[in-house]
Amino acid sequence: MKRKSFYLILAALFAATLLLAACQPAATEEAPAAEGEKAEEAAPAEEAAPAAEELTLAIEHFSIIEGTTWSGAHNRAGERIAEKYPNVNYVYREEVGPDLSVPFAEELIADGADIVVGNAEFMGMPLVEIADKYPDVNFVSIIASDLTTKDNFLRIFPRQYQALYLEGLIAGALTETGNIGIVSAFPSVQVIRRTAGFYLGVMDAAELLGKDITVYVKYAGDWYLPQEERDIATTLVDQYNVDVITHQTDSGSPLDVAVEKGIWFVGKDMDIVGFYGWADTNTVAISFDTRWEVLYDQIIQAMMAGDQPEKVLYLGMESTMTLADGTVEATVDIMNDNKVGIDAISPAALDKIPQEIIDLVKQRREQMMAGEWDPFTEHAFVSNGTGLDLEGLPVPAAGTEVKPAGEEPTVEWLLSQFNFDLEGMMILE
Protein backbone atom coordinates (compact mmCIF):
# COMPACT_ATOMS: atom_id res chain seq x y z
CA MET A 1 0.00 0.00 0.00
CA LYS A 2 2.82 2.41 0.77
CA ARG A 3 4.38 1.92 -2.67
CA LYS A 4 0.98 2.56 -4.39
CA SER A 5 0.50 5.84 -2.46
CA PHE A 6 4.02 6.96 -3.47
CA TYR A 7 3.31 6.46 -7.18
CA LEU A 8 -0.03 8.33 -6.93
CA ILE A 9 1.72 11.33 -5.34
CA LEU A 10 4.50 11.26 -7.99
CA ALA A 11 1.91 11.27 -10.83
CA ALA A 12 0.11 14.25 -9.29
CA LEU A 13 3.34 16.25 -9.06
CA PHE A 14 4.19 15.51 -12.71
CA ALA A 15 0.73 16.71 -13.86
CA ALA A 16 1.12 19.94 -11.87
CA THR A 17 4.49 20.61 -13.51
CA LEU A 18 3.01 20.26 -17.00
CA LEU A 19 0.16 22.63 -16.09
CA LEU A 20 2.59 25.31 -14.86
CA ALA A 21 4.71 25.05 -18.00
CA ALA A 22 1.63 25.49 -20.22
CA CYS A 23 0.70 28.69 -18.37
CA GLN A 24 4.06 30.40 -19.01
CA PRO A 25 4.04 33.24 -21.60
CA ALA A 26 5.60 32.49 -24.96
CA ALA A 27 9.24 33.62 -25.41
CA THR A 28 9.63 36.82 -27.38
CA GLU A 29 12.38 37.35 -29.96
CA GLU A 30 15.07 39.79 -28.80
CA ALA A 31 17.53 41.89 -30.81
CA PRO A 32 20.98 40.28 -31.14
CA ALA A 33 23.33 41.20 -28.31
CA ALA A 34 26.45 43.27 -28.92
CA GLU A 35 29.51 41.20 -29.81
CA GLY A 36 31.11 41.48 -26.37
CA GLU A 37 27.89 40.62 -24.61
CA LYS A 38 27.24 37.73 -26.94
CA ALA A 39 30.64 36.29 -26.15
CA GLU A 40 29.86 36.41 -22.43
CA GLU A 41 26.43 34.75 -22.82
CA ALA A 42 27.77 32.08 -25.16
CA ALA A 43 29.86 30.48 -22.44
CA PRO A 44 27.64 28.91 -19.73
CA ALA A 45 29.39 28.09 -16.47
CA GLU A 46 29.66 24.39 -17.19
CA GLU A 47 31.49 25.08 -20.49
CA ALA A 48 34.07 27.54 -19.13
CA ALA A 49 37.70 26.77 -19.96
CA PRO A 50 39.16 24.47 -17.31
CA ALA A 51 41.84 25.87 -15.02
CA ALA A 52 45.37 25.19 -16.27
CA GLU A 53 46.69 21.91 -14.93
CA GLU A 54 49.34 22.35 -12.26
CA LEU A 55 52.83 21.14 -13.14
CA THR A 56 55.93 20.77 -11.00
CA LEU A 57 59.39 21.24 -12.50
CA ALA A 58 62.03 19.54 -10.37
CA ILE A 59 65.72 20.16 -11.10
CA GLU A 60 68.47 18.02 -9.65
CA HIS A 61 71.60 20.21 -9.57
CA PHE A 62 74.86 18.31 -9.65
CA SER A 63 76.64 21.07 -7.68
CA ILE A 64 75.73 23.73 -5.18
CA ILE A 65 73.78 26.65 -6.64
CA GLU A 66 75.30 29.61 -4.84
CA GLY A 67 78.62 30.68 -6.31
CA THR A 68 78.33 28.64 -9.51
CA THR A 69 77.40 29.71 -13.01
CA TRP A 70 76.13 26.37 -14.34
CA SER A 71 73.74 25.38 -11.57
CA GLY A 72 73.07 29.06 -10.91
CA ALA A 73 71.76 29.45 -14.46
CA HIS A 74 69.56 26.34 -14.13
CA ASN A 75 68.17 27.58 -10.82
CA ARG A 76 67.40 31.00 -12.29
CA ALA A 77 65.65 29.22 -15.18
CA GLY A 78 63.40 27.31 -12.78
CA GLU A 79 62.52 30.51 -10.96
CA ARG A 80 61.71 32.33 -14.21
CA ILE A 81 59.49 29.50 -15.40
CA ALA A 82 57.55 29.61 -12.11
CA GLU A 83 57.23 33.40 -12.41
CA LYS A 84 55.81 33.10 -15.93
CA TYR A 85 53.34 30.29 -15.26
CA PRO A 86 51.17 30.56 -12.11
CA ASN A 87 50.35 26.86 -12.47
CA VAL A 88 54.00 25.71 -12.53
CA ASN A 89 55.92 25.04 -9.33
CA TYR A 90 59.71 24.78 -9.17
CA VAL A 91 61.54 22.57 -6.67
CA TYR A 92 65.13 21.39 -6.57
CA ARG A 93 67.87 19.38 -4.92
CA GLU A 94 71.55 20.40 -4.79
CA GLU A 95 74.79 18.39 -4.95
CA VAL A 96 73.13 15.36 -6.52
CA GLY A 97 75.55 12.67 -7.63
CA PRO A 98 74.74 9.76 -9.97
CA ASP A 99 74.04 7.48 -7.00
CA LEU A 100 71.40 9.88 -5.68
CA SER A 101 69.66 11.03 -8.84
CA VAL A 102 67.18 8.12 -8.96
CA PRO A 103 66.21 8.01 -5.23
CA PHE A 104 65.87 11.81 -5.17
CA ALA A 105 63.80 11.68 -8.38
CA GLU A 106 61.43 9.16 -6.85
CA GLU A 107 61.02 11.35 -3.77
CA LEU A 108 60.29 14.35 -5.99
CA ILE A 109 57.76 12.35 -8.03
CA ALA A 110 56.04 11.19 -4.84
CA ASP A 111 55.73 14.87 -3.94
CA GLY A 112 54.13 15.66 -7.31
CA ALA A 113 56.97 16.31 -9.76
CA ASP A 114 55.89 16.10 -13.43
CA ILE A 115 59.30 16.96 -14.93
CA VAL A 116 62.58 15.81 -13.39
CA VAL A 117 65.82 17.29 -14.74
CA GLY A 118 69.36 16.05 -14.20
CA ASN A 119 71.42 19.15 -14.97
CA ALA A 120 74.56 17.24 -15.93
CA GLU A 121 74.81 14.12 -18.05
CA PHE A 122 76.78 11.99 -15.59
CA MET A 123 74.04 12.27 -12.96
CA GLY A 124 71.11 12.74 -15.35
CA MET A 125 71.61 9.53 -17.31
CA PRO A 126 70.56 7.18 -14.45
CA LEU A 127 67.06 8.66 -14.75
CA VAL A 128 66.53 6.63 -17.93
CA GLU A 129 66.35 3.55 -15.70
CA ILE A 130 63.04 4.68 -14.17
CA ALA A 131 61.47 6.32 -17.24
CA ASP A 132 59.29 3.27 -17.98
CA LYS A 133 58.24 3.04 -14.34
CA TYR A 134 56.80 6.58 -14.46
CA PRO A 135 55.30 7.00 -17.95
CA ASP A 136 53.44 10.20 -16.95
CA VAL A 137 56.64 11.95 -15.88
CA ASN A 138 59.06 13.57 -18.33
CA PHE A 139 62.69 13.03 -17.41
CA VAL A 140 65.30 15.42 -18.84
CA SER A 141 69.07 15.10 -18.98
CA ILE A 142 71.72 17.48 -20.24
CA ILE A 143 73.76 16.17 -23.18
CA ALA A 144 77.53 15.73 -22.84
CA SER A 145 78.01 13.13 -25.59
CA ASP A 146 75.39 10.40 -25.08
CA LEU A 147 72.16 10.77 -27.08
CA THR A 148 70.00 8.05 -25.49
CA THR A 149 66.30 8.98 -25.52
CA LYS A 150 62.90 7.51 -24.74
CA ASP A 151 59.44 8.96 -25.26
CA ASN A 152 59.65 10.45 -21.77
CA PHE A 153 63.45 10.66 -21.43
CA LEU A 154 64.38 13.91 -23.14
CA ARG A 155 67.79 15.42 -23.91
CA ILE A 156 68.62 19.11 -24.09
CA PHE A 157 71.48 21.51 -24.69
CA PRO A 158 71.80 25.12 -25.91
CA ARG A 159 74.03 26.14 -28.81
CA GLN A 160 76.36 28.00 -26.47
CA TYR A 161 79.11 27.88 -29.07
CA GLN A 162 77.33 30.68 -30.96
CA ALA A 163 77.76 33.16 -28.11
CA LEU A 164 81.22 31.75 -27.41
CA TYR A 165 82.20 32.61 -30.98
CA LEU A 166 81.26 36.25 -30.32
CA GLU A 167 83.28 36.15 -27.10
CA GLY A 168 86.23 34.83 -29.08
CA LEU A 169 86.08 37.80 -31.46
CA ILE A 170 86.25 40.15 -28.48
CA ALA A 171 89.02 38.21 -26.71
CA GLY A 172 91.10 38.10 -29.88
CA ALA A 173 90.81 41.85 -30.25
CA LEU A 174 91.77 42.50 -26.62
CA THR A 175 94.91 40.41 -26.25
CA GLU A 176 98.14 42.39 -26.47
CA THR A 177 100.54 39.56 -25.68
CA GLY A 178 98.88 37.28 -28.26
CA ASN A 179 98.25 34.65 -25.56
CA ILE A 180 94.77 33.62 -24.37
CA GLY A 181 94.15 30.99 -21.70
CA ILE A 182 91.30 28.59 -20.98
CA VAL A 183 90.93 26.83 -17.63
CA SER A 184 88.94 23.74 -18.57
CA ALA A 185 87.30 20.81 -16.81
CA PHE A 186 88.21 17.68 -18.80
CA PRO A 187 88.05 16.49 -22.41
CA SER A 188 84.46 15.74 -23.45
CA VAL A 189 82.38 16.38 -26.54
CA GLN A 190 80.55 19.17 -24.72
CA VAL A 191 83.74 20.91 -23.60
CA ILE A 192 85.51 20.43 -26.95
CA ARG A 193 82.53 21.82 -28.85
CA ARG A 194 82.20 24.91 -26.69
CA THR A 195 85.93 25.57 -26.78
CA ALA A 196 85.85 25.26 -30.57
CA GLY A 197 83.26 28.03 -30.83
CA PHE A 198 85.44 30.38 -28.78
CA TYR A 199 88.58 29.42 -30.67
CA LEU A 200 87.02 30.09 -34.09
CA GLY A 201 86.07 33.59 -32.92
CA VAL A 202 89.62 34.23 -31.71
CA MET A 203 91.08 33.03 -35.01
CA ASP A 204 88.70 35.18 -37.05
CA ALA A 205 89.73 38.22 -35.00
CA ALA A 206 93.40 37.33 -35.47
CA GLU A 207 92.98 37.09 -39.23
CA LEU A 208 91.01 40.32 -39.47
CA LEU A 209 93.51 42.26 -37.32
CA GLY A 210 96.68 40.61 -38.59
CA LYS A 211 97.55 39.17 -35.16
CA ASP A 212 99.42 36.01 -34.18
CA ILE A 213 97.39 34.52 -31.32
CA THR A 214 97.87 31.28 -29.37
CA VAL A 215 95.10 29.75 -27.28
CA TYR A 216 96.26 27.60 -24.36
CA VAL A 217 94.01 25.02 -22.69
CA LYS A 218 94.78 23.28 -19.41
CA TYR A 219 92.45 20.79 -17.71
CA ALA A 220 91.62 20.75 -14.00
CA GLY A 221 90.07 17.27 -14.05
CA ASP A 222 86.53 18.14 -12.98
CA TRP A 223 83.93 20.90 -13.14
CA TYR A 224 84.20 22.38 -9.67
CA LEU A 225 87.71 22.37 -8.21
CA PRO A 226 88.33 25.93 -6.97
CA GLN A 227 91.94 25.48 -5.85
CA GLU A 228 93.01 23.55 -8.94
CA GLU A 229 91.29 26.12 -11.17
CA ARG A 230 93.14 28.91 -9.36
CA ASP A 231 96.49 27.15 -9.79
CA ILE A 232 95.91 26.64 -13.51
CA ALA A 233 94.86 30.24 -14.06
CA THR A 234 97.95 31.45 -12.22
CA THR A 235 100.17 29.18 -14.32
CA LEU A 236 98.62 30.44 -17.55
CA VAL A 237 99.31 34.05 -16.59
CA ASP A 238 102.76 33.62 -15.02
CA GLN A 239 104.26 31.02 -17.35
CA TYR A 240 102.43 31.57 -20.64
CA ASN A 241 102.01 35.36 -20.53
CA VAL A 242 98.25 35.14 -20.94
CA ASP A 243 96.47 38.51 -20.75
CA VAL A 244 92.92 37.29 -21.50
CA ILE A 245 91.51 34.29 -19.66
CA THR A 246 88.27 32.33 -19.70
CA HIS A 247 87.13 28.99 -18.33
CA GLN A 248 85.10 25.87 -18.92
CA THR A 249 84.78 25.13 -15.20
CA ASP A 250 82.28 26.22 -12.57
CA SER A 251 84.00 28.10 -9.76
CA GLY A 252 84.93 31.76 -9.63
CA SER A 253 88.63 31.06 -9.02
CA PRO A 254 89.85 31.94 -12.56
CA LEU A 255 88.04 35.28 -12.23
CA ASP A 256 89.75 35.91 -8.90
CA VAL A 257 93.12 35.39 -10.55
CA ALA A 258 92.20 37.75 -13.40
CA VAL A 259 91.32 40.45 -10.85
CA GLU A 260 94.56 39.91 -8.93
CA LYS A 261 96.74 39.86 -12.05
CA GLY A 262 95.00 42.79 -13.73
CA ILE A 263 94.10 40.94 -16.93
CA TRP A 264 90.88 40.60 -18.93
CA PHE A 265 88.36 37.91 -18.05
CA VAL A 266 85.68 36.42 -20.32
CA GLY A 267 82.76 34.82 -18.46
CA LYS A 268 80.54 31.83 -19.17
CA ASP A 269 77.00 30.58 -18.52
CA MET A 270 75.76 33.74 -16.75
CA ASP A 271 76.19 37.51 -16.66
CA ILE A 272 78.49 37.25 -13.65
CA VAL A 273 78.68 41.02 -13.13
CA GLY A 274 74.97 41.76 -13.52
CA PHE A 275 73.54 38.71 -11.71
CA TYR A 276 76.23 37.86 -9.17
CA GLY A 277 78.19 41.09 -8.78
CA TRP A 278 81.42 39.19 -9.24
CA ALA A 279 84.13 41.73 -10.08
CA ASP A 280 83.20 44.53 -12.47
CA THR A 281 83.59 45.58 -16.10
CA ASN A 282 87.16 46.71 -15.47
CA THR A 283 88.01 42.98 -15.39
CA VAL A 284 85.08 41.25 -17.12
CA ALA A 285 85.21 42.23 -20.79
CA ILE A 286 82.15 40.15 -21.73
CA SER A 287 80.21 37.07 -20.63
CA PHE A 288 77.69 34.87 -22.31
CA ASP A 289 74.39 34.14 -20.64
CA THR A 290 72.58 30.79 -20.95
CA ARG A 291 68.81 30.87 -20.58
CA TRP A 292 67.89 27.24 -19.88
CA GLU A 293 64.34 28.46 -19.35
CA VAL A 294 63.93 28.73 -23.14
CA LEU A 295 64.40 24.96 -23.39
CA TYR A 296 62.28 24.22 -20.31
CA ASP A 297 59.59 26.51 -21.72
CA GLN A 298 59.26 24.41 -24.87
CA ILE A 299 58.87 21.25 -22.82
CA ILE A 300 56.26 22.82 -20.56
CA GLN A 301 54.28 24.35 -23.42
CA ALA A 302 54.12 20.97 -25.15
CA MET A 303 52.88 19.31 -21.96
CA MET A 304 50.25 22.00 -21.40
CA ALA A 305 48.99 21.42 -24.94
CA GLY A 306 48.70 17.70 -24.24
CA ASP A 307 51.61 16.88 -26.58
CA GLN A 308 54.77 14.92 -25.97
CA PRO A 309 57.84 17.22 -26.05
CA GLU A 310 60.60 16.71 -28.60
CA LYS A 311 63.13 14.10 -27.54
CA VAL A 312 66.19 16.23 -28.39
CA LEU A 313 66.22 20.01 -28.06
CA TYR A 314 69.33 21.82 -29.33
CA LEU A 315 68.31 25.46 -29.47
CA GLY A 316 70.38 28.47 -30.47
CA MET A 317 70.19 32.24 -30.62
CA GLU A 318 67.24 32.13 -33.02
CA SER A 319 64.99 30.61 -30.32
CA THR A 320 63.45 32.93 -27.73
CA MET A 321 61.13 33.10 -24.75
CA THR A 322 59.10 35.96 -23.30
CA LEU A 323 59.58 36.27 -19.53
CA ALA A 324 56.89 37.24 -17.04
CA ASP A 325 57.99 40.89 -17.21
CA GLY A 326 57.73 40.94 -21.02
CA THR A 327 61.45 40.63 -21.72
CA VAL A 328 62.18 38.58 -24.84
CA GLU A 329 65.39 36.62 -24.47
CA ALA A 330 67.32 34.28 -26.74
CA THR A 331 68.56 30.87 -25.60
CA VAL A 332 72.09 32.27 -25.38
CA ASP A 333 73.50 35.75 -25.83
CA ILE A 334 76.49 37.87 -24.92
CA MET A 335 75.70 39.78 -21.74
CA ASN A 336 77.52 41.88 -19.17
CA ASP A 337 76.38 44.16 -16.33
CA ASN A 338 72.72 43.57 -17.32
CA LYS A 339 73.32 44.70 -20.91
CA VAL A 340 73.16 42.58 -24.06
CA GLY A 341 74.76 42.67 -27.51
CA ILE A 342 77.34 45.32 -28.33
CA ASP A 343 76.24 47.28 -25.27
CA ALA A 344 77.44 44.37 -23.13
CA ILE A 345 81.10 44.89 -24.02
CA SER A 346 82.89 46.47 -21.08
CA PRO A 347 83.24 50.25 -21.54
CA ALA A 348 86.88 49.92 -20.53
CA ALA A 349 87.39 47.19 -23.15
CA LEU A 350 85.42 48.95 -25.87
CA ASP A 351 88.10 51.61 -26.32
CA LYS A 352 90.66 48.88 -27.01
CA ILE A 353 88.64 47.00 -29.63
CA PRO A 354 88.94 48.09 -33.28
CA GLN A 355 85.70 49.18 -34.94
CA GLU A 356 85.84 46.38 -37.50
CA ILE A 357 85.60 43.81 -34.70
CA ILE A 358 82.71 45.64 -33.04
CA ASP A 359 80.92 45.77 -36.38
CA LEU A 360 81.56 42.06 -36.96
CA VAL A 361 80.26 41.10 -33.50
CA LYS A 362 77.10 43.07 -34.18
CA GLN A 363 76.67 41.57 -37.66
CA ARG A 364 77.25 37.95 -36.64
CA ARG A 365 75.00 38.25 -33.60
CA GLU A 366 72.15 39.58 -35.70
CA GLN A 367 72.69 36.90 -38.33
CA MET A 368 72.66 34.09 -35.77
CA MET A 369 69.51 35.46 -34.13
CA ALA A 370 67.88 35.44 -37.55
CA GLY A 371 69.11 31.88 -38.19
CA GLU A 372 71.07 33.04 -41.24
CA TRP A 373 74.67 32.25 -40.20
CA ASP A 374 76.52 29.84 -37.96
CA PRO A 375 80.27 29.59 -37.22
CA PHE A 376 80.20 25.80 -37.34
CA THR A 377 78.72 25.84 -40.83
CA GLU A 378 80.99 28.65 -42.04
CA HIS A 379 84.31 27.13 -40.97
CA ALA A 380 86.17 23.96 -41.82
CA PHE A 381 86.94 21.58 -38.93
CA VAL A 382 90.57 20.46 -39.06
CA SER A 383 91.82 18.14 -36.32
CA ASN A 384 94.61 19.14 -33.97
CA GLY A 385 95.32 15.48 -33.29
CA THR A 386 94.26 15.94 -29.65
CA GLY A 387 90.91 15.35 -28.00
CA LEU A 388 89.01 12.36 -26.66
CA ASP A 389 88.91 8.88 -28.17
CA LEU A 390 85.33 7.60 -28.16
CA GLU A 391 84.22 4.01 -28.60
CA GLY A 392 84.63 3.28 -32.29
CA LEU A 393 85.64 6.87 -32.96
CA PRO A 394 89.31 7.70 -32.35
CA VAL A 395 90.60 11.27 -32.51
CA PRO A 396 91.37 12.09 -36.19
CA ALA A 397 95.04 12.47 -37.04
CA ALA A 398 96.47 15.98 -36.92
CA GLY A 399 95.74 17.90 -40.11
CA THR A 400 92.67 15.83 -41.06
CA GLU A 401 89.83 17.93 -42.45
CA VAL A 402 86.79 16.34 -40.84
CA LYS A 403 84.25 18.85 -42.14
CA PRO A 404 84.73 21.28 -45.03
CA ALA A 405 83.82 24.95 -44.82
CA GLY A 406 80.23 25.72 -45.80
CA GLU A 407 78.84 22.32 -44.77
CA GLU A 408 76.36 22.27 -41.89
CA PRO A 409 77.19 19.58 -39.34
CA THR A 410 74.30 17.47 -38.12
CA VAL A 411 72.87 17.85 -34.63
CA GLU A 412 73.83 14.24 -33.85
CA TRP A 413 77.45 14.84 -34.93
CA LEU A 414 77.82 18.05 -32.92
CA LEU A 415 76.31 16.56 -29.79
CA SER A 416 77.95 13.14 -29.76
CA GLN A 417 80.89 12.90 -32.17
CA PHE A 418 82.81 16.20 -32.07
CA ASN A 419 85.73 14.63 -30.21
CA PHE A 420 88.82 16.56 -31.41
CA ASP A 421 90.38 19.96 -30.77
CA LEU A 422 90.71 22.29 -33.71
CA GLU A 423 94.06 22.71 -35.40
CA GLY A 424 96.38 25.20 -33.74
CA MET A 425 95.17 24.89 -30.15
CA MET A 426 97.81 24.31 -27.45
CA ILE A 427 96.64 21.61 -25.03
CA LEU A 428 98.89 21.71 -21.97
CA GLU A 429 99.68 18.69 -19.84
Image (cartoon, helix red, strand yellow):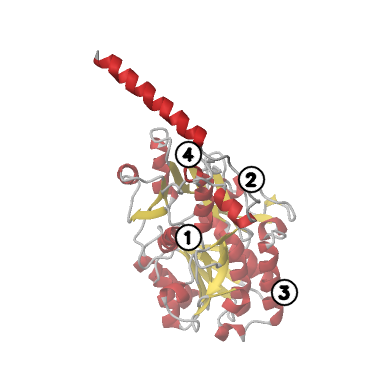
- For the residues labelled 2 and 3, the Cα–Cα distance comes to 79 Å
Residue at 51%, 43% (x, y): give it. Answer: 47
Looking at the picture, which amino acid does disc 2 mark? Glu
For the residues bearing labels 4 and 3, Cβ distance under 8 angstroms: no
Residue at 33%, 18% (x, y): give it. Answer: 7
Looking at the picture, which amino acid does disc 3 mark? Leu
Looking at the picture, which amino acid does disc 4 mark? Asn
Q: Check disc 2 and report the residue beneath it.
A: 29
**Front tag of 1 and 3:** 1
- For the residues labelled 2 and 4, the Cα–Cα distance comes to 55 Å
Circle nearer the N terminus (2, 4): 2
Q: Check disc 4 and report the residue beneath it.
A: 152
- Give how far across and how far down residue 373 sits, in percent: 71, 60
- Give how far across and how far down residue 217 sits, in percent: 51, 64
Q: Is residue 207 above or below residue 409?
A: below
**Front tag of 2 and 3:** 2
- For the residues labelled 4 and 3, the Cα–Cα distance comes to 47 Å
Q: Check disc 1 and report the residue beneath it.
A: 84
**Secondary structure state at the residue bearing disc 2:** loop
**Secondary structure state at the residue bearing disc 4:** loop
Numbered label attached to residue 208: 3
- For the residues labelled 1 and 4, the Cα–Cα distance comes to 24 Å
Circle nearer the N terminus (1, 4): 1
For the residues bearing labels 2 and 4, Cβ distance under 8 angstroms: no
**Secondary structure state at the residue bearing disc 1:** helix
Considering every residue shown, the one lying at the far top of the view is: 1
The quarter of the displayed image where residue 174 is located: bottom right
Circle nearer the N terminus (1, 3): 1
Q: Residues within 10 Å of mark 1 (few under 14, many from 20)?
A: some
Looking at the picture, which amino acid does disc 1 mark? Lys
